[in-house]
Amino acid sequence: MDRLILFRHGKAEPDSASGDDFDRRLEPRGVRESAAMGESLADLGMRPDLALVSAATRTRETWAAAEAVFPGAEVRFEKDLYLADAGSIRQAAERAGRGRGTVMVVGHNPGLQELAVDLLTEGKAPPALIARAARNFPPGAAAVFLIDNKGRPAFDGLFYPERGE
């Protein structure tokens, strides 16, 4: 894997009709922001070869909103990514990313945020950037890292959704 994109699901409803967190859907704003983030990433040439998407409804809907700008990306819906911790997310991306260019993980906080902060720290990003990611990694945000041939990360972008209503 040459690049890792961590993409947090869009803004979701507070509760699902079933009462199960797994079933929470995106709010209309979340659909818009997810599509816009996908377009922004694609415009910058950050297109996944493989998308690992949590099987939860809100992450599947995030991918559905963004996938049109990522033609040819293979997608895998992974139940184990639902509320996974930072270490589990990283391991899943590393395993799946062998022999791939860009891997995108569409998942949840706190695991995605924790992994973003870990990779920023490991890659010796500026302290202000690490603090920003630690303070806030909102729905629809993305963090991008270049990964060298020894698995070491280097910061390649931190993107937050525009909050136009």
Image: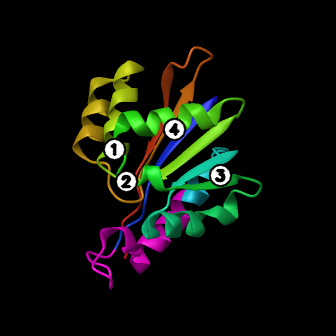
Dot 4 and dot 1 residues touching (CB under 8 Å): no
Q: Nearer the viewer, residue 136 or 16?
A: 16
Amino acid of disc 2: His
Amino acid of disc 3: Asp
Dot 1 and dot 2 residues touching (CB under 8 Å): yes
Q: Is mark 2 on a helix, strand or loop?
A: loop
Residue ID for mark 2: 108
Residue ID for mark 4: 92
Amino acid of disc 1: Gly
Looking at the picture, does residue 34 appear above or below residue 86?
below
Q: Is mark 4 on a helix, strand or loop?
A: helix
State the CA–CA distance, disc 4 to disc 1.
Answer: 12 Å
Disc number at residue 111? 1
Q: Tell me which numbered mark, 4 or 1, is placed earlier along the sequence.
A: 4
State which mark lies toward you, 4 or 3: 4
Q: Nearer the viewer, residue 90 or 12?
A: 90
Quarter occupied by residue 1: top right
State which mark lies toward you, 4 or 1: 4
Residue ID for mark 3: 43
The magenta segment: 13-37
Q: Tell me which numbered mark, 1 or 3, is placed earlier along the sequence.
A: 3
State the CA–CA distance, disc 3 to disc 2.
Answer: 24 Å
**Residue drawn at 55 percent across, 31 percent down:** 94
State which mark lies toward you, 2 or 4: 4
Q: Which residue lies furthest to the right in this view?
A: 72
Q: Identify the image quadrant of the C terminus.
A: bottom left
Colour scheme of the rendered structure: rainbow
Would residue 144 appear left or right of 113 to someone viewing this image? right
Dot 1 and dot 3 residues touching (CB under 8 Å): no
State the CA–CA distance, disc 1 to disc 2.
Answer: 6 Å
Q: What element carries label 3?
A: helix
State which mark lies toward you, 3 or 2: 2
